[in-house]
Amino acid sequence: MAAVKELKKTSYQVNENGYYGKFGGAYIPEMLYPNIEELRENYLQIMQDPSFQAAFHQLLKDYVGRPTPLYFANRLSEKFGAKIYLKREDLCHTGAHKVNNTIGQILLARQLNKKFIIAETGAGQHGVATATVCALMGMECKVFMGALDMERQKPNVERMRILGAEVIPAVSGNQTLKDATNEAMRYWINYPVDSHYIIGSVVGPHPYPDMVARFQSVVSAEIRQQLLEQTGTEQPDYVIACVGGGSNAAGAYYHFLDEPDVKLIAAEAAGHGITSGESAATTALGRIGILHGSKTLLMQTDDGQVVEPYSISAGLDYPGIGPLHAHLYDTGRATFYSITDDEAMDAGILLSRLEGIIPAIESAHALGALHYMDLKPEDVVVISLSGRGDKDLETYIKWGKY
Ligand SMILES: Cc1ncc(COP(=O)(O)O)c(C=O)c1O
């Protein structure tokens, strides 16, 4: 299902108060104010420093394996009647785009003289990416993870432990990403001085959404360059990405935000269907509210209680989206499709059979959007293949239809 809106003229960059249109800001408890303020005052200056940029890009190249390929998917293109390219974030070290951000944030935490790292994780990819960079830099790491997600993503739990991180189960709510984020924030409030909280998506109080989007923007910088080399033009007709909190989408969209000819397509998780009561289809069902420190669209009851989300994919099982994406939706700049579990699983198997690539179930939602689009043979489509399916093998096996 798609929601198409008329495009409004606006800026898609965060303003000086931390807002994207009416979304964003920093709604935080008093105790966290010094940390967030320290970050806000310093993040741009640190990130723009040439020596920081050099260290960041060196690690992205030699440690993460960037640039990731932009792969022309021949058989997938034939099937959908357009020129489809896959941005292979699944080939990043640790298996997903999440590491682009954790490399950036750990370098930043060191600049701020922080002693240990806190993180939350849903699918475990961000937790693994955080545990990885903490091992790399010799920093202590505590990862909060919903108890249900720990069950669904066992291999990633063990990977984090092997890397030396402490994985702390979140047992509140429905024991998924929202609850892990709540508990990580609670912990941070108790240890605010020496710790840095590495948020894994473009969510949370300002400046996190902007900071994470900037670290992930390397993805669209590479897409432009690679498209130019492969097709002679830097602009695709469409960029498609799944949206949990929205970091892979923000990275894939970033350098196209102000180019309306490049259509931005977002796939959110419809779970068992948007009217089933079991979904994470935030734009289809959400209203404006405050979640994890920012004003954004979120799924909530009439009296403002957060609705428990559901998706087969742990990384999309979140009741909100980042404020940038709420703004992209609100202004009509991005078109959102709600993709069900079944549609995503079918798309994951299709890619496996057509291209020999088993995608993460999160990324399979982005592929699922292809069925809803009216594509022409000359259309150039870039899909953010945000992660690999290894972590999801048990879910594929349980689903069974292959
Ligand atoms: C492979 C993969 N893709 C996408 C996501 C969703 O996160 P985001 O929307 O921040 O990219 C996750 C989250 O864990 C993930 O592991």
Image (tube, rainbow, N blue to C red):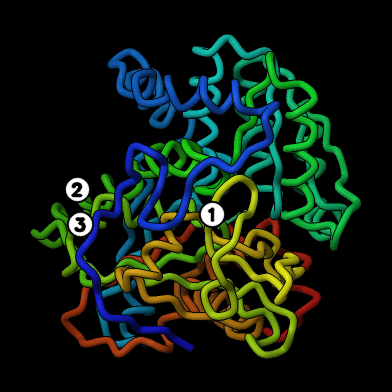
Residue type for callout 2: Gln
Q: Residue furthest top?
A: 113
Q: Is residue 323 left or right of residue 306?
A: left
Count of labels in the image:
3
What residue does disc 3 label?
Answer: 258
What residue does disc 1 label?
Answer: 295
Residue 100 visible in the displayed image: no
Q: Name the residue nearer the viewer: 10 or 274.
A: 10
How many other residues sit within 10 Å of disc 2, few (<14), some (14-19) or many (≥20)? some
In terms of secondary structure, where does tag 1 sit?
Answer: strand
Q: Nearer the viewer, mark 1 or mark 3?
A: 1
Which quadrant would residue 327 be assigned to in this image?
bottom left
Q: Name the residue nearer the viewer: 349 or 211.
A: 211
User: Which badge, 2 or 3, is on the more N-terminal residue?
Assistant: 2
- Is residue 58 positioned above or below 262 on the image? above
- Is residue 15 positioned above or below 64 on the image? below
Residue type for callout 1: Lys
